[in-house]
Amino acid sequence: MSNNQNLPQQREVVYKAIQSASEKFTDSQLNFSKEQVFAVEQLMKNSYSMKVAQNNPQSVKLAMYNVAMVGLSLNPQLGQAYLIPRRTRSNEDPKIVLDISYRGLLDIATASNSILCAKSELVYSTDHFEYKGTMERPVHQFDPFLPKAERGELKGAYCAAKLPSGDYLIETMSVEDMHEVRNKSEAYKHKVGPWVDWAEQMYLKCPVKRGFKWWPNQNNQRMASALKLLNEENGEGIVTESNSDSNIVSLPVPPSLDQVSPDVQQKVSILIHRAANANAWSACQELMVQRIKNRNDLAFALHQLNLAKSASNKNLEQPNALNG
């Protein structure tokens, strides 16, 4: 029998895998019938996607489970999420996964009223960029019609989020910070996965993921589920909380104030002030672990963070100066 004659039977395997996930949509805000159509359309866009789906129908089922869990539609006009073939390890067979765009992450945040809107942008060496702090929109001027190859080297990315209060929160990441995230991805180490296939989208996602931790309404289960999916199942390489905890346990005794440079003191003070304003102590701790490489400086920073958090929990006024 020819491959063409086998095609209806092969497609039936994929249809059944999608249909088997219908029960997960009972409590979902999404309409399963519509998502089923979108799923089939996406998988049939190219022969490779369909082949992977046919060979690994269980992955299709799990991907549809994730669609229901995060509540992002596969509608291509919305651009929130996609079913794509991917390998997260070089020695494994490809599978179908749910990929969430940075637009999808922002849609989750706006739906929960964490933010009113947000935009993530890449910054290149020929752009005019002026950073004005975490609470003020930066100046970013460039020719949007210029070919990217003519905008120079990638310097970094930022996400500007407008809060319900009307204030802005700006999250920036240098290209070195983003490469540090990328290099922790097991998929990238084997030259497969999202950092290889969709590098620009990954750069855009990075400041959104980091910035989310500073936004209000952090108990956002949809966002937490989406980030866990991207980081742990899709191989995007963000440092997990357990990794941060293991680094903290082995730190030395915190040094006194006079044993820490003024530059480090200032950076720590700014981070703690930001954490207090956003009530984002866990996010601040993770950021300190990622950014402060000197172990003595990190021990000092986390000690100051714990003092500030303790004072906040006791409803005391947040001190402006660091405690010795």
Image: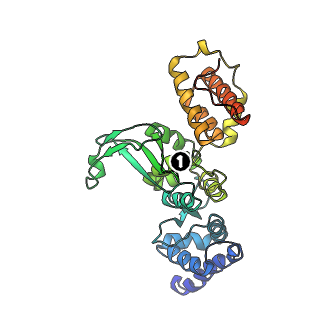
Between residues 185 and 203, which one lies in front from this camera angle? 203
- Three-letter amino acid code at the position of disc 1: Tyr
Residue 229 in the image: x percent, y percent? Answer: 63, 56
What residue is at 59 percent from the left and 49 percent from the top?
A: 216
State whether residue 309 is above or below residue 218.
above
Between residues 192 and 132, which one lies in front from this camera angle? 132
Asked which secondary structure carries label 1, the reply is helix
Between residues 113 and 108, which one lies in front from this camera angle? 113
Colour option used: rainbow
Residue 195 in the image: x percent, y percent? Answer: 49, 51
What residue is at 57 percent from the left and 84 percent from the top?
A: 6
State whether residue 247 is above or below residue 229.
above
Residue at the extreme top: 258
Left/right of residue 24 with respect to residue 12 in the rendered view? right
Left/right of residue 29 with respect to residue 84 in the rendered view? right
Image quarter (top left, top right, bottom left or bottom right) of the C terminus: top right
What residue is at 48 percent from the left and 47 percent from the top?
A: 167
Image quarter (top left, top right, bottom left or bottom right) of the N terminus: bottom right
Residue 89 in the image: x percent, y percent? Answer: 60, 52
State whether residue 49 is above or below residue 180.
below
Left/right of residue 88 with respect to residue 204 in the rendered view? right
What residue is at 54 percent from the left and 42 percent from the top?
A: 181
Residue 5 in the image: x percent, y percent? Answer: 54, 87
> Mark 1 packing: few (<14 Cα in 10 Å), some, or many (20+)?
many
State whether residue 302 is above or below residue 80.
above
| Residue 312 in which image quadrant | top right
Q: What residue sits right under mark 1 in the picture?
A: 188
